[in-house]
Amino acid sequence: MLFLIIALGAGLILAAQNAINAELSACLKSLIAASFLGYVVGTLFLLLLTIIIGDFSKIADLFSAPLWLLTGGLFGLIFVTSCIILFPKIGAVETVMLPTLGQIVAGMLFETVGWFNVDIIPMTLLRIVGLMVLLLGTYIAVVLATKRKTLASRTQNNQASSRLVLRLWAFGAGVLCTVQSTFNGQLGNLIDSPTVSALWAFVIGLIVLVFLKPNTWQVLVRGIKMPQSWSAGVAGGTFVTLMSLLIPKLGPGLTVSISTLGVMVGAMLVQQFGLFKSLRQNVSMTQVIGILIMLSGIILIKMF
């Protein structure tokens, strides 16, 4: 029960991190600078946490791990950066729900095929029905809710194709998030330290961002003084650590499913109240119905 509550909390943290990262990016007018600062703070936070809990010596165990397990941080960087870009373009709820759909579909695929050393779970009729229910809920919450909120116009029709691309991007980001969580979880289990696993993921992301030239030092100095940088970094580090801890205990499918509830509730709160200076939009009844149907699909897939 405790692990389920932790998974729920991890989802709430991710929803908040998405909104904070988007706010930080807008303040700095630089996507790369916002990501870089978040990774700097997250790395420092995880390094301090590793020292406090006495796992610093386990960093040496990373060098004996399989190379493919060490690449989770790259997928995590793509996921975080994608969420920052997509948040102001498609809104808080869609930025959460579409990656969530990608995570669950990827988790089902990994478990069915047994990819990445995941325990195989046979594809049953009930799991297929659950996936169909999940897709129906996503369509209602994302597509129908958008149609109800906007008037049909020529301009909107011209934007439909670009919005479809953004939604597919969000779905793909969710797939990569599952890859990251699976890799990090197995790495943390291998070296017996989810904190060191999360620290390594942040170090890899930080190295990549350095080569992307995060912006002028003036922007970085200004950003590091902003509370959003520290909030985003701590939230990101906490989320990755919790997922690394939970996946070996609950499995990738159940971990993603339970954290989904927290993510969705958090995203709805962000959108409804305009938290973290995000665009305030009332959550419609259509979105609520769609989310409840999605959750029903998750239960069918993962609980029975």
Image (cartoon, rainbow, N blue to C red):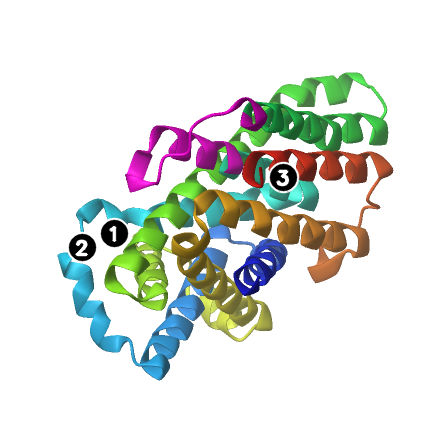
Q: Which residues are magenta?
A: 104-127
**Mark 2–mark 1 contact, CB under 8 Å?**
yes
> Looking at the picture, which amino acid does disc 2 mark?
Ala
Query: Where 108 falls versus 87 (above or below)?
Result: above
> Looking at the picture, which amino acid does disc 3 mark?
Ile
> Which one is nearer the viewer's eye here, 31 or 250?
250
| Residue mark closest to the camera, 3 vs 1 | 3
Sequence order check, earlier mark of 3 and 1: 1
Quarter that holds the N terminus? bottom right
Q: Residue at x 67, y 30 (%)?
A: 138
- Coordinates of residue 248 in the picture (x, y in percent): 38, 54
- Coordinates of residue 109 in the picture (x, y in percent): 42, 30
What secondary structure is marked by label 1?
helix
Mark 2: few/some/many CA within 10 Å (<14, 14-19, 20+): few
Sequence order check, earlier mark of 2 and 3: 2
Q: Is residue 31 visible?
A: yes
What secondary structure is marked by label 3?
helix
The residue labelled by disc 2 is 65
> Which one is nearer the viewer's eye here, 209 or 199?
199
Q: Residue 164 vs residue 105: left or right?
A: right
The residue labelled by disc 3 is 299
Quarter that holds the C terminus? top right
**Mark 2–mark 3 contact, CB under 8 Å?**
no
The residue labelled by disc 1 is 70
Q: Quadrant of residue 114?
A: top left
Label 2 – label 3 distance at C-alpha: 34 Å
Main SS type for the magenta part? helix
Q: Residue 79 vs residue 213: left or right?
A: right
Find out whether residue 126 is within the magenta segment. yes
